[in-house]
Image: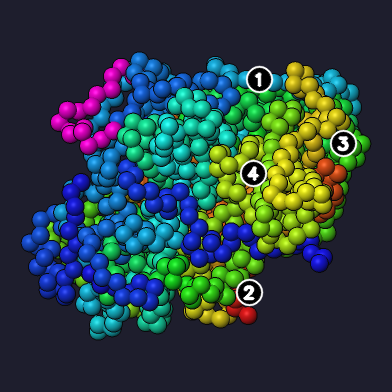
Amino acid sequence: MRFTLNGSAISLDVVGTRRLLDVLREDLHLTGTKEGCGEGECGACSVLIDGEVVDSCLIAVGQVEGREVTTVEGLADGGRLTALQQAFIEHGAAQCGICTPGMLLAAHVLLQQSNRLSAADVREGLAGNLCRCTGYTKIIDAVLACTK
Amino acid sequence: MVTTSTIGRSVPRREGTAKVTGAARYTDDLVVPGAWYGKTIRSTVPRGRIRSITLDPTFDWNRVVVVTADDIPGDNVVQLIRDDQPVLAPKGGEIRHKEEPILLLAAAHRATLEEAARHVRIGLEPLPPVYALEEATEVFTTLEIRKGTVVDDLEDGVVVERTFRVGLQEQLYIEPQGAIAIPEANGAIKVIGSLQCPYYVHRALKRALKLTDQQAVVVQAETGGGFGGKEEYPSIVAVHAALLARKAGRPVRLIYDRHEDLAATTKRHPGVITHRTVVKEDGTLVSQDIEIVLDGGAYCTLTPVVLSRAAIHAAGPYFCPNVRIRARAVATNTPPNGAFRGFGAPQSLFAAELMVEHVAERLGRSSVDLRRQWMLRLGDTTATGQVLTESVGSELVLDAALKACGTVGRSDGRTVKRGRGLSLVFHGSGFTGSGEKKLQGTIGLEALADGTFRILTASTEIGQGTKTIFCQLAADALGVGLDKVVLAPQDTSLVPDSGPTVASRTAMIVGRLVQEAATEVKERLKREKAPLRVEKSYIQPDSIHWDENTYRGDAYPVYAWACTIADVEVDMTTGEVRVTDLVTAVDCGKALHPVMAEGQIEGGSLQAVGWATIEEIKMNDGGYQNDRLATYLIPTALDAPRIRTILVENPYSRGPFGAKGIGELPMDGPAPAIIAAIHDATGVWLDEVPATPEKVLAACASR
Amino acid sequence: MHEVNYLRPKNLAEAVELYRTTPGCRLLAGGTDLMVMLHACTLRPEPRALLDVWSLPELKGVRRVKETLEIGAAESYTAIMRSPDVQRDLPALVAAARTIGAAQIQNRGTLGGNLANASPAGDPLPVLLAYDAVVVTDRRAIAIDKFFTGYRKTALQTDELITAVRFPLGRQVAFRKVGTRAAQAISKIVMAVSRSPARIAVGSVAEVPLRARRAETALDRGDVDGAVAAVAEDIRPIDDVRSTAAYRRAVTQNVLRELTQQ
């Protein structure tokens, strides 16, 4: 099967019913995408498919045939952190960091959709990404800082 | 060149870039060539005797490594406080809880493991289980704290008696438990894992696998949250992985999935706390008689220490001349409970703070005023007889929180009622009593030939900022830039034992050692050349006196205070409680890194909000019904209130720059404040957490 | 568990044929339920193949079909919420879609999936009942009030494939979900109400998404109090991990009163 991963064309020989999450982590050695629950509840496995945020534990890899997949590794431009990644560091939005990749991707989509986000918008947009460390406060601060 | 100190500045997190790029490597991210997968086979009954363990011969067991209790070379004991918990329940032995580990399997592929698991037959003879705390007869431990003489009643006095219940809570670190064990040369076994306390795991490995100090090597990988849930439990995961690796002769990955983690690992101790408080008509607090019963689950784990902290905080941050606290922890046939942020204090402070509300209501007084009347102040004596000689933040935080809050928008709709509640709490920083003295935590600091400095500590980064803060402290004392300071990995073969990363001790106790070591290194570099190495161990100040037998004296080096104000909306149609705003003022001594200090408060507060509202565990025959993330609910970003933090700096002379430990304190305040807010909104008093919509609606209906 | 094949038909005709002829075949759309169960090995009977209908153009889209609005069975809830037609004509469906999971789930969840699963807690299902929607399959149209036949059972034949859901226009429906938390929540009760015609549909209070018939009769004659009293008899809630029968009964009544006042 063929798809685009973080901007590059990929060709894989895999069983199509395997979870995209497992193919990313085990076959492609991209471990930035995390497994927090395997049930589509925590969002730690979030990736983008054609710019939409989804839980990769719920995607059969065959379903990304011909699609564009973006993982956290695809955010930074050749080592240069995005404004959002910088904001996460500056505002203390990452503590243990396990939710951070998924959170960044979900926030990235929000920022692409609108430059005028309220805190309520951000909360709703990130509602599928559980964080246990931060209370979400500084995550929301970091995302809002990027809307200026 | 003068280097500006970064103390008090929110510098970038040391490992921040790795975390935002996905480069940080957590346990399951590590690639270990040749590693097999491991799995734990667990009891499906809450109590019984193992009559047989059979491997169904229709399955090809050649592809699988099987470990039972017979394969344990050392003691079949999970090394902790009491030797009561087996690593694996043996044939003929007693099962004491659902999910108790019996057997371990390892195989090259997960599918093989799953199939093998289906071919294991455990013959169990069920025994009658005990679930309810009230029916438990086996007592793990008791303790009593006395001050003065309590009275039952008082002429022209007022007596308020009330009982409170607190529920189980799962730590819910977003990264599940996991360890990878790698057999190495000379009988050594290295375990890499998601953990808070490398040396706890080290001791457990030595005991069960009969290893020397050098043969057992424990390395902490980047850890995705702990909150106490990875204080003692990882010892079990590590020993299991090590046993498999030893028998398989190859590395084994033992990574829990969320369901197993929820079903089998430790939870916050639930309990029942009863207060009988006697006051004079003018509000003077005369007597507090308190009884605490905590449910420890099936095995002792850390229960005596949890009970200890619960008891010491049970009277609340108030001065009372006559106090009796009788505390006991009992055993039930439920999975063992263990460490979770707060460690007994959230439970007992919940009751203490609500008692203030009830007494105030009885007297027709404002509970804020009553707190002012009762609160411990500088020079006062606590329930254990500790004189508070410095850094008492009680009134500071109360005033700061009140000042920060406007008036609550008064209630409104028929259907949605708003209310506000307040709590005042304190939390002892550092280990209880002689704990720090016994631990003698040690760190090292090296000056390397290339002009950099390396901190050697077993204190772990679990998101709270250990690495960043230690580098700040060292750099400041050395007078160098942050970029000149690095940390050695948290690897027991490289670093000494600074003690566990628990008990709100890391910044205050261990950070201070880092500071002292750096100061000494700087001094020595005036006379000597690098490389050189300094070690610093904790020395208990002479002024700290604690009597373990009478439970009297200086329970903690210092307390930190917090005042929380919670605003809630209660939907009268559904009983749903929405916490809209939380304001917390925290007396932290000194904020070494303000953003990280706020982060601790915000995160801990939301965990407490969850405990107070939606984090409920229902039991079913001694097991947890809520064993998936779809059913064990933590707050999402939409559930979370706006949280505002006010840091009050009221220095403690022995903390680095005056810093006190605050990691657990944020857990103590929100729950009673929320219950008080629900009462303010609806007129209804709940006596337990979680205050679920079912309970709120029923209470409002029966009003 | 054996390896499960992945089948990806190019069009609906091929999908229908494969579904009919492939043994042990399960339909895969958004995967929000199926992939969880596949990974946990809880699908019964054990599947041999997954037939991916997510990308079939015939199952996507929102279109006017005479006096109805037709939504493709594999249209995502996000796309449904963004459709100007749905926003204008079926605002209760937008409201319901918004309460499903969170962004990640809304981007993949589908009406086809929710219907085929027939979970009594499916959030949009009471809305479909209140609108008197019609389930369109590859061979017929099934009225929604005939669709749910038992606990997680539907009127679908063995190899019948849902292609679209059709909604009549011009009906006002009010919706409320009472979840276990503010997002990513399974409902404790979920309700959709239409005054005219009188429809009271409730989820999570029976083994199927339920039409509360006695309550509807009362509502039909304008007797709100009567409807509130009757709905307690219509429903058969249970105690479970999420909530209690008593709570569900009380809240059903409270929410019905609230929604009839909108």
Q: Residues within 10 Å of mark 1 (few under 14, many from 20)?
A: some
List the residue tagged with mark 2: A145
Toward the viewer: C37 or A87?
A87
Helix, strand or loop at mark 4: loop
Q: Do the residues labelled 2 and 4 touch (CB within 8 Å)?
A: no
Q: Quadrant of residue B625?
A: top left
Q: Quadrant of residue B534?
A: top right
In the rendered structure, does residue B59 fall within the stretch colored magenta?
yes
Residue B97 visible to an observer of this rendering: no
Which numbered tag is attached to residue B457? 4
Left or right: where A49 falls relative to B384 = left
Q: Measure the alpha-carbon separation of dots 4 and 3.
A: 31 Å
Q: Measure the alpha-carbon separation of dots 1 and 2.
A: 52 Å
The type of residue carrying mark 1 is Thr
Counting residues from the start of the chain, the first of labels 1 and 4 encountered is: 1
Helix, strand or loop at mark 2: helix
The type of residue carrying mark 3 is Leu
